[in-house]
């Protein structure tokens, strides 16, 4: 498991621990609709998130990163594994205990518009969670909604407007306000800026940073865009076909990626200076189906340095530098001091 570096804020206690998380989705077929196969969306994933930090979870679409976030919040029930929040096994909670946990662990979706009722003023949509949890009276809830709107840079009068009256960036602020109003400690940000223009992306990312600083929030930031992840994350975990293949501090990962898959992802990031060029690594083939993942290292059919061993022996995550783990038999050759 990755060693935990001390954070700039002096904290290094684990708020979230994911242990050996597995999520398979059954595929049914035939007249009797029997289970004929499983989509292995998440397969034996473990990581930790330190209180107050942002862990970026990055990978191509379909790699299982969104399923990890949803399973941690029990929007999907896991097939097996553990998710500890402040040391409590969240998967064993039921009833009121689970309800309390849901206040502390919130999610912001990629498309906030889809989760807002078009017939409700957004003030009412934001208050929905408070009502479900029986928090305060109407006046107190209204005050909390206004406070949450203010935190994301929206005005009091916005509470009475309807979703279609807002721009994409404003809608995402509403999505964030909806999570904030519950006073969470931990938020899964599921591709929160992917649908936004670049200039608006920066605005929303800055709001998220400010909120983290002022409220001590802990984030899991799920994204496919490495440049966005670099901007906001303290540490980054890279996923490929249901597995975590590399975890490192942001600077270390971007300076010295050790897994061939991470190296390929990095090589596709445009350089800010057009006179500089990276050697682009073009991966062969498409991502294999999670219905029938390759044996051994799941990356082996596309890996530019694969050897025979890779197709038979699954590489385990190994710590090759302090706080930098990688699942590759031959990654030692890439370690820079
Ligand atoms: Fe490539 Fe083999 Fe390393 Fe997998 S274990 S990333 S196939 S070299």
Image (spheres, rainbow, N blue to C red):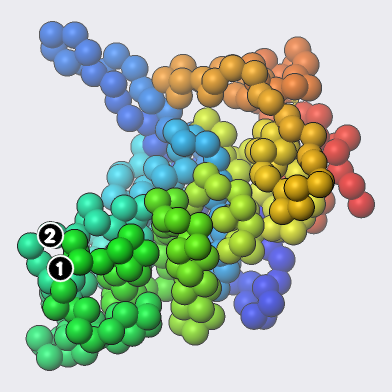
Q: Any mark on residue 162, and which?
A: 1
Q: Residue at x 69, y 58 (%)?
A: 250
Task: Tell me residue 215's x, y (percent).
Answer: 46, 82
Q: Residue at x 33, y 30 (%)?
A: 25
Quadrant of res 84: bottom left
Q: Is residue 108 above or below residue 33?
A: below
At mark 1, the secondary structure is loop
Q: Are marks 2 and 1 in contact (CB under 8 Å)?
A: yes
Task: Tell me residue 121's x, y (percent).
Answer: 13, 71
Task: Tell me residue 272's x, y (percent).
Answer: 72, 53
Q: Any mark on residue 312, and which?
A: none
Seen in the image, is 271 located left or right of residue 226? Answer: right
At mark 2, the secondary structure is loop
Q: Does the image show residue 156?
A: yes
Task: Tell me residue 52's x, y (percent).
Answer: 55, 73
Quadrant of res 174: bottom left
Quadrant of the rendered image holding ligand 1: top right
Seen in the image, is 155 located left or right of residue 298? Answer: left
Q: CA distance from mark 2 to mark 1?
A: 7 Å
Residue behind mark 2: 118
Q: Is residue 102 above or below residue 252?
A: below
Q: Does the image show residue 220?
A: no
Question: In the current view of this chain or complex, which residue is farthest to the front?
Answer: 275
**Camera-side residue of 77 and 192:** 192
Local crowd size for mark 2, using a 10 Å CA cut-off: few (<14), some (14–19), many (≥20) = some
Seen in the image, is 106 located left or right of residue 13? Answer: left
User: Would you say the beta carbon of the disc 1 residue lies within 8 angstroms of ligand 1?
Assistant: no
**Camera-side residue of 334 and 284:** 284
Local crowd size for mark 1, using a 10 Å CA cut-off: few (<14), some (14–19), many (≥20) = some
Q: Residue at x 10, y 67 (%)?
A: 120
């Amino acid at each position: 498991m990755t060693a935990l570096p001390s954070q700039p804020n002096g904290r290094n206690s684990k708020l979230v621990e994911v242990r050996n998380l597995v999520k398979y989705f059954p595929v049914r077929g035939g007249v009797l609709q029997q289970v004929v196969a499983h989509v292995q969306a998440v397969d034996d994933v473990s990581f930790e998130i330190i209180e107050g930090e942002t862990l970026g979870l990055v990978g191509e679409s379909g790699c299982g990163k969104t399923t990890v976030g949803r399973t941690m919040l029990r929007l999907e029930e896991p097939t097996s594994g553990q998710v500890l929040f402040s040391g409590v096994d969240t998967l064993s909670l039921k009833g009121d205990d689970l309800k309390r946990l849901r206040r502390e662990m919130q999610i912001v979706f990629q498309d906030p518009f889809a989760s807002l009722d078009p017939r409700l003023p957004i003030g009412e949509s934001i208050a929905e969670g408070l009502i479900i949890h029986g928090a305060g009276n109407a006046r107190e809830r209204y005050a909390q909604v206004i406070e949450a709107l203010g935190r994301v840079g929206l005005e009091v009068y916005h509470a009475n407007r309807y979703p279609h009256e807002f721009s994409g960036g404003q809608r995402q602020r509403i999505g964030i306000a909806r999570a904030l109003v519950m006073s969470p400690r931990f938020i899964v940000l599921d591709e929160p800026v992917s649908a936004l223009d670049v200039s608006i992306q920066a605005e929303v990312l800055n709001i998220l940073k400010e909120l983290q600083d002022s409220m001590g929030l802990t984030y899991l930031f799920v994204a496919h865009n490495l440049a966005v992840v670099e901007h906001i994350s303290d540490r980054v975990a890279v996923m490929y076909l249901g597995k975590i293949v590399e975890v490192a501090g942001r600077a270390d990962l971007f300076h010295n990626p050790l897994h061939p898959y991470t190296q390929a992802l990095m090589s596709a990031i445009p350089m800010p200076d057009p006179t500089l060029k990276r050697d682009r690594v073009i991966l062969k083939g498409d991502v294999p189906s999670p219905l029938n993942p390759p044996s051994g290292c799941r990356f082996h059919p596309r890996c530019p340095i694969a050897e025979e061993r890779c197709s038979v022996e699954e590489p385990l995550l190994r710590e090759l530098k302090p706080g930098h783990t990688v699942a590759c038999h031959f990654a030692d050759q890439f370690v820079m001091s």
